[in-house]
Image (tube, grey):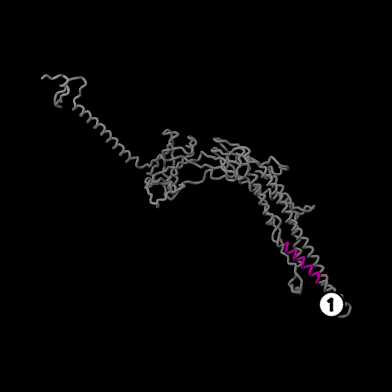
Amino acid sequence: MTTTTADMSHAPQSPDAPQPAGPYRIHPKAIRARRNRRLLVVAALVLVATVGYLVYWWTHDRFWVRTDNAYVTGNLVPVAAQASGIVTQVLAEETQFVNRGDLMIRLDEHQAYAALGRARGRLGEEVRRIAALFINRKQLAEKLRSRTARLNSAEHDMERYQRASPSGAISKQILQNTADKISGLDAEVRETQAELDSLDAQIGGTTVMAHPAVDLAKHQLIEAHLEYARQQIRAPISGYVAKRKAQVGDRVHPGALLMTIVPLDHLWVEANLRETELQHVRPGQPALVNVSLYGSKQTFHGTVEGLVPGSGSAFALLPPDNSTGNFIHIVERVPVRIALPADELREHPIRPGLSTVTSINITESGQSVWTSLATPATAEYETDVYADELPTAESMAKEVMATNLVVSDRGEPVDSFLEAEEELDRLAPKKGDARTPSEGRVSPNLDRTRERRDPVPSSFVPRRSPDLGSATFPLTPSIGPGSGSLGPEAGRSPSRLRSEFDRDHGARSIRDR
């Protein structure tokens, strides 16, 4: 039986049988040896890397807490409308830098101007009405003095008639007529005293300036002035404009967000650390921050300012309720605030919201976990752009009150009339007076109204940021008749108005002496 070459190629061969020689044939033992050598090399490299990592962790890495769940944040100051009106001009755009006090948005001031004029007129009318009450009180006091004098004269006649009556020189009819006259005069004194008491109930114990009705009208004028002044919206702090929403023609209401100002000179990092990593984190420990904007080329040297008193889930809009039974244990994260140095921020500007890789060195002891190094000490925590609005409104109100307080051609203020009330005290009954109220006479015991001067507000110079310099922005209306009276007087420099008021006040004081 013959065997072909094809049949012999499929016949099984012994593993120990010698392989045919050829340039592409490798012995299986050589393959296994090469594979073992490679595995040994890989195992050695893994062992060396593990040992190296353990050594690095033991000597360095175990003293640092790292996280890439950290972001740059800062104070995003909203610019909101404080009065109602229609936007007529937008003076600031996104990415622009604005100084504190710069005019950013104008609102239509027509309605606010009209309301301010009504408040001025209402205050002047109220001052004149209360001044008229003081004049009426003076008139009633003079009438009471006249009627009291007539009553005293009739009483003196009655005493003389009674002494002459026993001799027959005075008839009984004269005595009766005199007695009736005394009764009538006494009734008139009672009536005048009642009218005077009614006026005392309205103006007693106060002055025209301090009367409640005048004070109410005064504060209504102040409110109207504030409404008018806030038709011009100014930057509360210095920074860059972002998220502008105001458009010309929009009708805004108090509280409507118009834009946001971001001061880039004060930023910090919020690093969200796992609760298992917070054991040794303390305020005051140094931190290294690498912002993705610069990568590893720039490292910020920060400081831990404090730990937020709660995890992120505790302050969530819908906090988890683990008592429902659907409980899943999740490692919570707690925000840690890390301050960034201002000089490094100036050299390498960054923006809120950028991602960072933050490392905290926990080898330093730091301070107690109950303390915090964060302080509201930078410029964006305070603004003075509204500080001069109230003093200006007060000056305007006092000018209106002083102008309407003079009601006579002689220029004599009503308050000086009150000094005449001291003479009325002589009309009060003396302790030795034989007549008593039970005999039908009402004593004109009037409450003496003491003159009280309202203090003139001192000159007010609002604080300004260095970037504003000495620039001022007077509040000058552009419409309405007589708007000059609401120009510099209603702005940031009430010096002329105040000097005129002080001069009139001083002249009035000298004349009263």
Please state which of residues 382 and 31 is positioned toward the viewer in this rendering: 31
- Residue 342: x %, y % from top left: 49, 39
- Judged from this view, the residue extending furthest toward the front is 1
Q: Residues within 10 Å of mark 1 (few under 14, many from 20)?
A: some
- Judged from this view, the residue extending furthest toward the bottom is 166
Please state which of residues 204 and 173 is positioned toward the viewer in this rendering: 173
Question: Which residue matches tag 1?
Answer: 162
Q: Is residue 47 above or below residue 193?
A: above
Quarter of the image that includes the C terminus: bottom right
User: Would residue 380 be found to the left or right of residue 460 on screen?
Assistant: left
Q: Report the amino acid beneath label 1.
A: Gln
What is the quadrant of residue 156 in the picture?
A: bottom right
- Residue 164: x %, y % from top left: 86, 78
Q: State the extent of the magenta-drawn residues as a range.
A: 183-199
193 part of magenta stretch: yes
Residue 321 in view here: yes
- Residue 251: x %, y % from top left: 61, 42
- Residue 73: x %, y % from top left: 48, 41
